[in-house]
Each structure stands twice: as structure tokens, then as C-alpha cells.
Image (tube, rainbow, N blue to C red):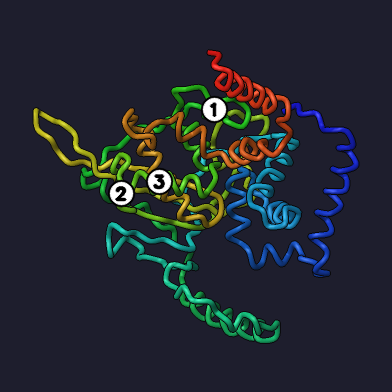
Amino acid sequence: MGYVAVKGGTKAIEASIERLKYERLKGEEVLEIKTILATMRSLVDQVMSEASLYAPFLAALAIKQAGGSMEEAVFLMRAHRSTLPRHYYSLPVDTESMFVERRVSASFKDIPGGQLLGATNDYTHRLLDFELIEENTDANHQWLRDYEAKLAANMAQEQEIQYFPKVVDYLRAEGLFDYYPEDNDPPKDVTKESIQFPTTRSERLQVLTRGQTGAVTALGYASLRGYGQVHPTIGEVRVGNVPIHVQHPYENNNDEENAFYIGEIKITEVESFVPVHVKKDNKEELEFEIGYGISYGQNETKAIAMSILDQCLENPHGEFPTHDEEFVLLHIDSVEATGFISHLKLPHYVTFQSKLDSIRQVKKGAETGEN
């Protein structure tokens, strides 16, 4: 937005930036990037998700530069992302090849392969741990050595790496869920093309996974409470690493066997089972639809909320805002929302004075009896 600073604005801005640096340094402590990476993984994952850039080191740098402000860190990451060339598009990822760290289902007690609780705060007591005040490096090293020794003993008993099938596949085998043909149409890239309504599902999923975690969670919660009454059961939440492949630059096929492995990323994937009533043969029957959510890193609440909104937007309903794709997709972007709210701090002298003049004229007219 083209706002003109008032006279002397340049010096004031420079002084403000200098003061910002002072506020960061006045505690005379240096926060190392490696410390953020080691101790704030959830924050790093959230920044990467909303910035749609998988780069843990850069996310940690953005968090440090932003002084812990999520909105500013995401803004920095997206600005950096816009400068990066895009040489390749990766091949589609099959999440059944995920190296699973955590896998739980709220739909079934026993699932093939078993439930893996993994690392999560879900089962901890929400009480402040005052022992962390006295935490020291030597004690941490000893705890790590003991835990890693226990892990090594457990891994020695494992025969081979195990991959876990999807829960929904067993329900499909029973005929409880339909099979759908794969849609291999190239998805539109919402970072390069503005979305046009009505959107495709690929566009909706991209915007949802880039959405501000709090906003996506709030709208998912609103739907759960009653705005559309979407109350799913979590078929499966899985967290783990998936391999990324790119095809040879001079070959046009999508053959993964001849593709190049370039690394792996950690993701959270959710499939929710949403009960719906459909009419068949003049009768109303209960069926299930699948809501899908996915996010960089371990970001389970957002992915679950995303799966709720995915199903909502697949079934547009004018009565409920959570089923309105324009309402949802245009209001969950962290950079857009923060930028538009923050622009109110910038000068609005001319427009505000114009409104004041109008009010003065109305009041003056009322005092003199003029219409």
C-alpha cells in the first residue's frame, strides 16, 4: 500500500528499527539458532506450515529475527520463499511409505499394526514443571544416554522396518467406503496463481494447509460446535517422515523407480470419517465421507481442523459460513490477515479528517436547524 510518511519520517523509522534491535539485545543473551531448532520444534513446524516452505533452519532464523512473533516469522519466510527459483516439482507422495513416528485412531481400539503414541503432549499433566528452572546440561546428557541405550535395545529386536497401511483401506475392503479413481490432473499452484471461485479441491487444500493455525482451528471448532454440525471421528492421525523424489529433467514419465531421491520431510496427515445422510431409493441412509488434512511437521490440531473444513467445503451450504469457500479461504491466511489488520496503524490522516469534516458539518447543520 502506498502510504507517504510524514515529514521527518525516515529518521523516526531508523530510530524505531534501532530501538527494536535494542529490545532484542538488552537482555545480553544470544539465542542460538540450534537452540530454537532443538527446543522449539512445534513453533518451527508451525512457521514452516504457514509459510509453505519446508526449511527448519530458516524457520528458526525467522523466529529469532521476529522475536518470537509468529506472524512476523511467517511473513519473513514467505518473503524469502518468493525469491527462490523452482527447478522441479516432486512426484506425488504415497503416505503409506511414511516412516511412522506416531499413529493413533479414535475410530478403532485395535488397528492393523497397532497404535503408536509417539511424542505428544496429549497424555501429560498440564502443570508447570518447576524442575526445568534448574535443568542442566550434565543431567540432560545422562538422561539422553540412558534413553538411547534403551532405544538401541528395542531396535535390536526389530527384524525390519515396518510400514503401516491406512485404516480406511480396511473399511473400503468391507465395502463401507467407495473407491475413487486417482485424479492425475496437475494441481493449480496457489502461490503462483490467484484463486478463482469456485475453487478446485487441490486449491482448497493448499490454502487450508497454508492457513494460520489459530484461524483454521477456530473455524474447525465453529463447525464442530454447530455451524454445519460436522462432527467427525478421527480415522487416523499419522506423523512421520515421507521420502521426496523428483523425476529426471529429461524424462517426462512419473516412474518413481527411475526418479531421484532428494530427501524427506516430516508431515502430519489426518483422515476423518464424517457421517452424512444420503437419500437412496426414497430412503435416507447413513454413510461416511472422508475429510483430509495435512501439514508440515507435527501439527495435529491444525490438520484435524483442516480435515473438518475440507469436508465442509466439499459440501457448500449457504446457511453456514464454515461451508462458504470464499468466507473460509479468504480469511485464514496469516500474512493477508495480519497485514490488513496492521495497516490500520499506518497514516490515515486524509480520510479521517474528511470524515471529521462531514461529522462537523452535520452537527453544525443540526445546531442551526439546517437540513
Foreground disc of the pair 1, 3? 3
Mark 1 near mark 2, Cβ–Cβ under 8 Å? no
Left or right: 106, with 73 as reference point: left
**Residue 346 vs residue 323, the one in the foreground:** 346
**Label 2 sits on residue:** 232
Q: CA distance from mark 1 to mark 3?
A: 24 Å
Residue farthest along the top direction in this orientation: 371
Question: What residue is shown with label 3?
Answer: 220
Residue behind mark 1: 188
109 w.r.t. 149: above or below: above
- Three-letter code for the amino acid on which mark 1 is drawn: Lys
Give the vertical position of 194 relative to 64 (above or below).
above
Mark closer to the chain start, 3 or 2: 3
Q: Residue at x 33, y 48 (%)?
A: 224
Q: Between disc 1 and disc 3, whose residue precedes?
A: 1
| Rendered position, 19 above or below 135 | above
Q: Nearer the viewer, residue 110 or 78?
A: 78
Label 3 is placed on what type of residue? Answer: Gly
Q: Secondary structure at mark 3?
A: helix
Mark 2, Cα crowd under 10 Å, few <14 / some 14-19 / many 20+, is: many
On the rendered structure, is 3 left or right of 166?
right
Q: Position of residue 53 (x, y in %)?
A: 64, 44
- Residue 336 image offset from top left, x and y in percent: 61, 36
Under mark 2, the amino acid is Pro
User: Could you classify mark 3 by the number of other residues whose Cα lies within 10 Å: few (under 14), some (14-19), or many (20 or more)?
Assistant: many
Residue 356 is left or right of residue 314, and the answer is: right
Mark 1 to mark 2 CA distance (whole Å): 28 Å
Q: Residue furthest left?
A: 282
Q: Position of residue 197 (x, y in %)?
A: 47, 22
